[in-house]
Image (cartoon, rainbow, N blue to C red):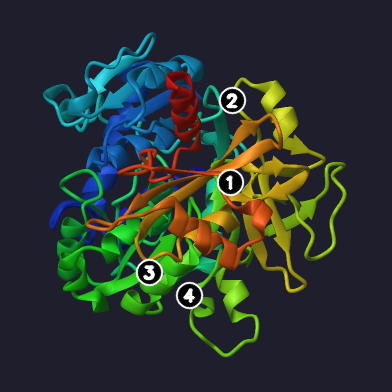
Amino acid sequence: MNLAHLIERNARLFPERTAVSFGEAPFASHATFASRVRAIASHFVERFRLPKGARIAIAMKNAPEFWEVLFAAWHAGLVAVPVNPKLHPREIEFILEHSGASLCFVSSDLTEVKGGRAEIVEAGATDYARLREPCRAGRGQGVAETRPGDPAWLFYTSGTTGRPKGAMLSHRNLLAMIFAYFADIDPVEPADCIVHGASHSHGSGLWGLVHFAKGANNIVPESGGFDPAEIASLVNRFPGVSMFAAPTMVNRLLASPAFAASNRAHLKTIVYGGAPMYAADLARALDLLGPCLAQIYGQGESPMTITGLPKAFHTGDGHPAFASRLASVGFARTGVEVAVVDADSRPLPPGEAGEVVVRGDVVMSGYWRDEGATAKALKAGWLFTGDIGRLDADGFLTLLDRSKDLIISGGMNIYPREVEEALLHHSAVAEVSVVGRPSAEWGEEVVAFAAARPGANLTAAELDRLCLERIARFKRPKDYIFVEALPKSGNGKILKTKLREMMAAAKEDV
């Protein structure tokens, strides 16, 4: 089993169809793309003398070359290490060193990254262009034999709680993810496409594999990132558009006049996930976009595949539990088992909160070179996600928070998300995040960071009154901190670690 066979099949079935586009222009047909993949793989084997299982890092903003390098690595029997290009150079260098990468392909904005033992190659430069010509005719071009459990992608976590860890995703894991997408989220046809506004190194890159599997078109915006006006232009140009977007990206699309005016009949599916989608934001998205939204819940350790809420469950079908289901992250994906357990790993009955655990072919085999972290995450065949949630009697999972974000104040458990949901009912609140702060009296106390919509004003008194109307008194924030915008990762996730740092710095200044 080797995912590179997908590319060879596309070259035979759809040689003239577009495999990758750069902006609105075709970048490579399936036949051309497969030829380049074979050629680059031949250099890995013959010129660089890389043994099977060697690691190839890819640290670049979204670019067509990402896909060439990714599939060439697999073609040669190597392991890809996609790296978030928005990380600090020291963080990138740590990943290169920790993974033991032999080569690191970078975009022009990252050429100063120090590779340690890894040789740095700039994608798109002259030296890279030479890799597209076979090293030697007839050698190193056959797809390498790999076992289903062989690692294919080292998925490095964000590292917000310490050093990032490399989840080992095998060819089997990624193929299980692909099949689950077709089973639960959406069928894909060769005439369809995916627009990559989110990072190739994470969710959008994983969904790219889904579309390569069906010979569809992977469209890379010329900006290499997420720009709502550019996304709107691509939606106008291409029919059958799917995309992955963090909730913050969905909100930016909703606020874009260009996207509002785009031909949304071309928009097939927006899969959102990676962070909470609050009820008020989801209602606005459904009003504007209609039934094209699907939600997924997953982790790098179980890539994009734990639970899902398909498009059909986003429409008001009159079901008495419609509202609660819409607030959930859906039900277990095909081929996946999901449970909620207590502190002793015992399954909890419906309605009780505990840690979410998952097992199935999509779950990683462990963390690269980290037996201790692997032992904590994988127990008795289950992946312990670190997320707190509860299952209802019908199997719908509602996430409450990360276990590390749970606030215990006066002996009472407070889940930040429910406080955030209450605060977002204020029309002037653009975004909000709730964290815990040490308290001599209560152990911890609730602090809310809030950003106002342009031209609006917020006061602590207004937000306090809103909380008193909607949540228990003990859950109210003890303090409100107003900011222009909340700090986010390159993938659109709010960085609560940064908020805690801001609190600590403010306390030192007092």
Q: Which residue is mark 1?
A: 173
Secondary structure found at label 1: helix
Residue 300 location (% of width, % of height): 54, 42
Q: CA distance from mark 3 to mark 2?
A: 34 Å
- Residue type at tag 4: Lys
Q: Label 2, on which residue?
A: 368
Disc 4 packing (10 Å; few <14; some 14–19; many ≥20)? some
Marks 3 and 4: CB-CB under 8 Å? Answer: yes
Q: Nearer the viewer, mark 1 or mark 4?
A: 4
Mark 3: secondary structure:
strand
Is tag 3's residue or tag 1's residue first in the polypeptide sequence? Answer: 1
The mark nearer the N terminus, 4 or 2, is 4
Q: Position of residue 415 (x, y in %)?
A: 64, 51
The residue where tag 4 is placed is 311
Q: Earlier in the sequence, mark 3 or mark 2?
A: 3
The span from disc 1 to disc 2 (Cα, nearest Å) is 15 Å
Q: Amino acid at mark 3?
A: Thr
Q: Secondary structure at mark 4?
A: helix
